Amino acid sequence: MASFSERVRELRQENSWSQPQLAERLGLTKQSISLWERGIKKPEPETFEKMCELFGVTAEYLMGTSDERVLPTDEDINAARWRAEEDDELLALNLSKFCRLSPNSRRIVMAALNEAFRVDRENGVLEAEGEYKVTVRTTWLDKPPYGYGNYKSKQED
């Protein structure tokens, strides 16, 4: 990926702006732009934000840490949120089904899941580990013979 200095030069040239023209748009001097493009200095945070808006790119793109130039639209974000909610509902439904299976059927499902995980890990296509947080609530401990349903208080004796 490109460095910050390379991205500034690239974006300035894409817009057919000279260094003085970019400096004027940012309220700075030509020397500031020159120092950035030579990799000697970087802009102040406020100027950096202004540059992102001016060029219409993400901060990560301008810094050279990503090749994604534009931020997702609200429509993209909402679509992703809806997909995630549908995924959550499907996961909850499937976990509910899993809990109702016999021990033998659970072993079959777990073996298939472990094999799929192994294959995806080897192929490098697993989602990042920190992307998901799952909370599971169960009532099996609340039911006899394990839970409170099997407990008699001393007052009942």
Image (cartoon, rainbow, N blue to C red):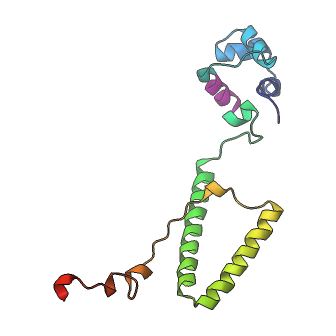
Question: Which residue is at a point 57% across and 58% down the rendered structure image?
Answer: 81
Quarter of the image where one finds residue 134: bottom right
Q: Quadrant of residue 5?
A: top right
Q: Is residue 120 magenta?
A: no
Q: How many numbered marks have been drawn onto this rendered protein structure?
A: 0
Quadrant (top left, top right, bottom left, bottom right) of the N terminus: top right
Residue 37 in the image: x percent, y percent?
80, 19
Please report the residue visible at 44 percent of the width from the left and 82 percent of the height from the top.
Answer: 140
Q: Is residue 32 left or right of residue 143?
A: right
Residue 57 appears in view: no
Q: Which residues are magenta?
A: 48-58
Q: Residue 12 in the image: x percent, y percent?
A: 78, 23
Q: 135 above or below 129?
A: below
Residue 31, placed above or below residue 50:
above
Q: Is 84 positioned to the left or the right of 29 in the image?
A: left
| Residue 108 can be seen in this image | yes
- For image coordinates 63% across by 90% down, the residue present is 104
Q: Looking at the picture, tell me which residue is in the foreground, 133 or 81.
A: 133
Magenta segment main secondary structure? helix
